[in-house]
Image (cartoon, rainbow, N blue to C red):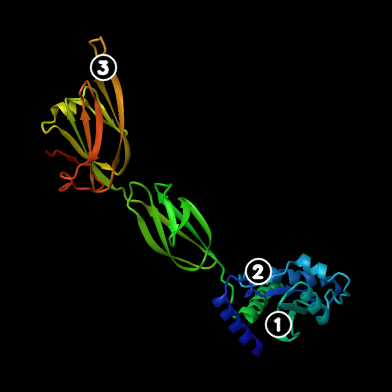
Amino acid sequence: MRNTAWLAVLFAVCMTLVPRAGLCQPGVTVFPFRNNGQVQHAGLSSGIAAMLTTNMTKSRGLTVMDPSRVSGALSGIRLTGGAPGVEDSLKAAASLGADFAVTGEFVIFGSRFRIDARLYDVKTGALVSAEKAQEKEDALFDAVDGLSDKIIMGITGSLPVEPGGLHVVSDPAGASVKVDGDDAGRTPAALADISPGQHEVEITLEGYKPFIEGITVSAGKTAKLDVKLVRLFGGIRVSWKGYPSSDVGIGELSIGSSQFINNLFGRYCRNIPAGTYAVTVVMPYKDESSWESRATWKTYIAEVVVEAGEVSDVFINNDRRAPRIEIGRCVSCASGWNFDTNIAWYETP
């Protein structure tokens, strides 16, 4: 067991200095285990090896050889009890370019079994570590899981960490999600392969207050974050030169022409959810070069962006020779407005 300590230190130092060079990712070959018991259990010879291989791939610091390549390297080698001897295993592992070889044996007596696993350094042929598992037959899977963890520990000095998941839901849906500053799609978002620990989740949607919160993800479990986003409001002020002759539309909001005529201050003001709106108004237009005396009615459209906590100006010029809609920012009238989530009316000079 003394060999495992220096291997773990060497692995940790290497991963720190050159984590992406490919030099620090040891190759491991798992060979079929020898059956020292009854013939009817012969299938476990390759079965135990396959389960160990699957479990060991959970460690991102190891390169585990594919079982089909192992079978190819063993072709022509005499197998005793369904498994190669140590020397043949080391030769086959060397031919595959592996750094370590895992061999072993098992035996079943009645309802109990025992598995012995050995880890060899392919280059030197030295026995790095030897582990055992002895359980009831119905605990075979748990025993193999325990053995794979011990083998991984013998090489890397640490156990693989099972990732967790994160399910992010928002009301309304369609919000952008970032986890630790990285884009993670839109809600509802089902995220997998999240490392256990604390993560920062940011949820943003135009017209809503950004939501930022830390959440803890546990290994093998899915954390859920269900957020009701808070609507942001800005202000909008509509003013004019010459009374509009038809209703004014701001998004889905319709402002009747009578509102303009009866508004003594000459302006129409209110809180409105932050966002982008299309302003539409039908105004008369008369081409001065035309011989006709009647004006032509036209629909004019402009786009206004209402920012949270700010007031946007919509100016309607009803001049028949040059009707138009002008959009700007009302700096002087923003103070004193209550930009909360309740729609409010304002009349300002």
Q: Which element carries disc 2, helix, strand or loop?
A: loop
Q: In screen coordinates, is 139 left or right of 281?
A: right
- Residue 39 visible in image: yes
Q: Quadrant of residue 123?
A: bottom right
| Residue receiving disc 1 | 132
Please identify the quadrant where the C terminus is shown: top left
Mark 2 closeness class: few <14, some 14–19, many ≥20 residues within 10 Å: some
Crowding around mark 3 (Cα neighbors within 10 Å: few <14, some 14 to 19, many 20+) is some
Q: Secondary structure at mark 3?
A: loop
Q: Quadrant of the N terminus?
A: bottom right
State the CA–CA distance, disc 1 to disc 3. Answer: 97 Å
Q: Amino acid at mark 2?
A: Thr
Q: Relative to 24, does residue 170 appear above or below in the rendering?
A: above
Along the polypeptide, which appears first: circle 2 or circle 3?
2
| Residue type at tag 1 | Lys
Q: Which mark is residue 287?
A: 3
Could you say which disc has been placed on residue 57 in the image?
Answer: 2
